[in-house]
C-alpha cells in the first residue's frame, strides 16, 4: 500500500513535469554523431526523451555514455550514440527517426512514451506512433530493445492499464528485446534523482544501467547475429 501511495504522490506532479518537459526541449539539427570505431564495432543508438538525453547532467553522466562505459568494461566493442531529446513525445520521435538513427546503426534502444503519458495523450495514439517506429526499424533490419514506461496514476486506472499494456504487447507482438520499466529501482528514490524528484541523477542513471545491461547484452547478441547473417547474404 505504501508503494502505491508513493507512486500516486510521485505522479501527482505530472502536470508540472509536462510543462517542464515542454520548455526543456533540446532541438537537434543533425543526426547523433558517434565516435569512430573499428569495423566490427556494434553501433547502438539510444533513442528517447530526457531520460535518455540526460536532463540536468553532463554528457558523460547521461544514460548512453554510462551504458557504453559499462558495456566496454564487460568486454563489448560498442559505441552508444545519444539520440535523446528532452520533451519528445512518441510523435516527435517518429518525425525525427530517419535522421536520428543513421545508416550503419546496428541496434536501437527505444525509450519514449513518458511525455505522452504526462500529457494524457490517448494510449491508442502512443501505441500507433511506437508501432510505426518499430516497423521502420524492422524494415531496416535493426534489432530493437523497447524500454517500458508507466502512466501517471492521476489519469485514472483505465488510462494506466491501457497505457502500461502498450509496451509488453508491442514487444511480444514484434519479438523485441524488452525491458519492462526504464526507471525500475530509481523512481521515488530521492538519493537517485535530481532535485525535481523526477529525473535521475548520475547515480540514478548508473542504477538504470546496472539493471538494463543484461537486456542490452541480449540486444548486442541479436545485432551481432544480424550482422553475421547480412555478411553471408
Image (cartoon, rainbow, N blue to C red):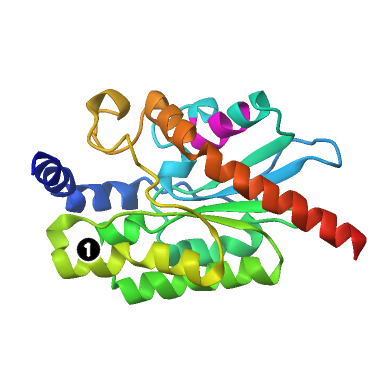
- Whether residue 82 is visible here, answered yes or no, is no
For this view, does 35 lie left or right of residue 130? Answer: right
Whole-percent x and y of residue 82?
A: 58, 42
Exactly how many numbered labels are in the figure?
A: 1
Write down the region rendered in magenta: 62-69
Q: Is 56 included in the stretch rendered in magenta? A: no
Q: At 63% from the left edge and 65% from the top edge, which residue is drawn?
A: 137
Please identify the quarter of the rendering in which residue 54 is found.
top left
Q: Residue furthest right?
A: 232
Whole-percent x and y of residue 17?
A: 24, 47
Q: At 68% from the left edge and 60% from the top edge, which residue is drawn?
A: 142
Please identify the quarter of the rendering in which residue 213 is found.
top right
* Nearer to the camera, 98 or 123: 123
Q: At 41% from the left edge and 43% from the top edge, which residue is drawn?
A: 51
Q: Is 68 included in the stretch rendered in magenta? A: yes
Whole-percent x and y of residue 133?
A: 54, 67
The residue singled out by tag 1 in the image is: 160
Q: At 21% from the left edge and 55% from the top edge, which residue is drawn?
A: 152
Please, is residue 70 above or below residue 114 in the view?
Answer: above
* Nearer to the camera, 111 or 88: 111
Whole-percent x and y of residue 107?
A: 66, 52
Please, is residue 127 above or below residue 191 in the view?
Answer: below
For this view, does 194 lie left or right of residue 79? Answer: left
Magenta stretch, main secondary structure, is helix
For the C terminus, the image quarter is bottom right
For this view, does 112 lie left or right of residue 230? Answer: left
Disc 1 secondary structure class: helix
For this view, does 77 lie left or right of residue 186? Answer: right
- Whether residue 178 is visible here, answered yes or no, is yes
Amino acid at each position: 500500500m505504501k508503494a502505491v501511495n508513493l507512486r500516486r504522490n510521485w505522479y501527482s506532479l505530472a502536470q508540472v513535469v509536462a510543462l517542464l518537459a515542454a520548455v526543456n526541449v533540446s532541438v537537434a539539427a543533425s543526426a547523433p554523431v558517434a565516435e569512430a570505431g573499428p569495423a566490427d564495432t556494434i553501433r547502438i543508438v539510444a533513442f528517447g526523451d530526457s531520460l535518455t538525453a540526460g536532463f540536468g547532467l553532463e554528457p558523460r553522466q547521461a544514460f548512453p555514455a554510462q551504458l557504453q562505459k559499462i558495456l566496454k568494461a564487460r568486454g563489448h566493442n560498442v559505441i552508444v550514440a545519444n539520440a535523446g531529446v528532452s520533451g519528445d513525445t512518441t510523435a516527435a520521435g517518429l518525425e525525427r527517426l530517419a535522421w536520428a538513427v543513421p545508416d550503419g546503426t546496428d541496434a536501437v534502444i527505444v525509450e519514449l512514451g513518458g511525455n505522452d503519458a504526462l500529457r494524457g495523450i490517448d494510449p491508442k495514439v502512443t501505441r500507433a506512433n511506437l508501432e510505426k517506429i518499430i516497423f521502420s526499424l524492422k524494415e531496416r533490419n535493426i534489432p530493437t530493445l523497447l524500454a517500458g514506461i508507466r502512466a501517471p496514476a492521476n489519469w485514472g486506472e483505465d488510462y494506466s492499464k491501457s497505457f502500461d499494456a502498450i509496451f509488453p504487447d508491442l514487444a511480444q507482438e514484434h519479438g523485441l528485446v524488452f525491458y519492462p520499466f526504464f526507471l525500475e529501482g530509481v523512481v521515488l528514490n530521492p538519493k537517485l534523482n535530481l532535485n525535481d524528484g523526477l529525473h535521475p541523477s548520475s547515480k540514478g542513471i548508473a542504477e538504470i544501467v546496472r539493471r538494463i545491461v543484461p537486456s542490452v547484452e541480449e540486444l548486442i547478441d541479436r545485432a551481432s547475429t544480424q550482422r553475421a547473417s547480412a555478411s553471408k547474404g
